[in-house]
Image (cartoon, rainbow, N blue to C red):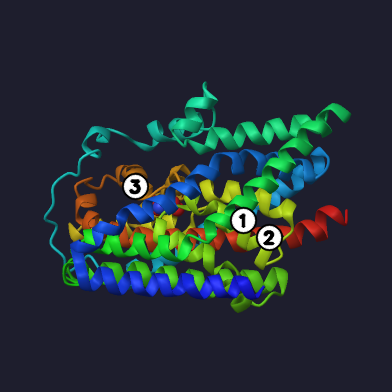
Amino acid sequence: MKNKNWLLYFILVGVVLGGICGWWFGPRMTAVAWIGDIFLNALLMLVIPLIVSSLIVGISGLGDITKVGKTGLITLIYFMTTTAFSVVIGLCMVNLLTPGESVKMVSEMPEGVASKNSLGITDVLPDILQSFISPNLIKSMLDMDILPIIVFSLVFGGVLTTLGEKGKGVISFFDAVNEAIMKMVHLVLYLAPVGIFALIASKLGAAGGGDAFWAELMKIGKYAFTVIAALLLHALVVLPAILIFFTRRSPLKFFKGASAALTTAFSTASSSATLPVTIECAEENNKVSRRASLFVLPIGATVNMDGTAMYEAIAAIFIAQMIGVDLGFTEQIIIFVTATLAAIGAAGIPEAGLVTMIMVLQSVGLPLEGIGMLLSIDWFLDRCRTTVNVWGDSIGAAVVDKLEEKYVEGG
Ligand code: ASP
């Protein structure tokens, strides 16, 4: 336990020093980017075997199919409700603070957005559904295309439980794989203080250092403030309230337990790369049951993104405000729905939310050029929303664990 505290303090020192060095030394800090990449790649290396083994062990640990169904339903309800809460908070804040009103839109269509110019919700919805199934699992693994891997592992794990003794052998194989990978996560975590330092310092350095970052931030300062305030409200009020209500746990202690995952999320801007640390924190520090964390967290890292959903809604209304379009109630409802879908469709990788935002803008006829206005500062806001995404997943695992104990295990 002492060992863990020690590591955590070093990680926090890494965050602070990374911020200071990146701010102060600017582009020179890009020289340490390779150290951050080693840490990031070490985490990414573990993601696919971790997801596959976690879901197989997780689903087989849940018991028979009715129990799996009930736990799945609880998880789904948690994901949907918390995402809905976060989008509503985002919509209220952006309508209240109107950050776009005093800003002039001067921007070009960003690359990669232009090609998707004609996408509408009716094109994107089948796209999202299609992305659940892949004709080639190996290719999905190579591309880190996680949704089909989740679907495959869930079904595979479910089917294994119906094979009796034969199935048990395979399940215990994956159980051992999972334990071994988690031990590797322990080892990778020792790199975290230096890795996190390097990731933050080099990214801030690449953005030009403190002065350039500040100047960019101030250009759309009220917008950044709205996003951060809404994220904080969700992360510090709504999610802790849910944690207390369902589990009677102390949010402060839970926060401390999850802090290695939260700082990793902030420094990598990727829920998927953070997944190994999220599982480690949930099981080891926050004592969430293994079966709940192995089931909820891999799925959550890919589909449950409270921060991203909120961000997409705020950004869409911000763009509307910039060009002087007054969106009515119906349009705001459409944004609510599409932002939620866009967050489910977004991969757990850096700046994925910017791409799925196209669907949100298209659904209410807003110009895609607006995304150009958000680009310069997205690397930073992405980190903030990814941290909230991971926080939402971590609390989700604890809530599902408790409810499963009460309603599924207890009958
Ligand atoms: N970077 C985010 C994540 O990995 C996704 C996004 O909002 O771009 O959770």
Q: Is mark 2 within 8 Å of ligand 1?
A: no
Q: Position of residue 262 (x, y in %)?
A: 50, 65
Residue drawn where x is 22% and y is 65% of the image: 100
Marks 2 and 1 close (CB-CB < 8 Å): yes
Q: Position of residue 74 (x, y in %)?
A: 70, 53
Residue drawn where x is 68% and y is 63% of the image: 284
Quadrant in which the N terminus appears: bottom right
**Alpha-carbon span between mark 2 and mark 3:** 34 Å
Q: Which residue is mark 3?
A: 357
Labelled disc at residue 283: 2
Q: Is residue 214 left or right of residue 302?
A: left
* Local secondary structure at mark 2: helix
**Alpha-carbon span between mark 2 and mark 1:** 6 Å
Q: Is residue 186 left or right of residue 290?
A: left
Q: Is residue 323 left or right of residue 17?
A: left
Label 2: how many Cα within 10 Å (few below 14, some 14–19, many 20+): many
Q: Which residue is mark 1?
A: 279
Residue drawn where x is 69% and y is 32% of the image: 155
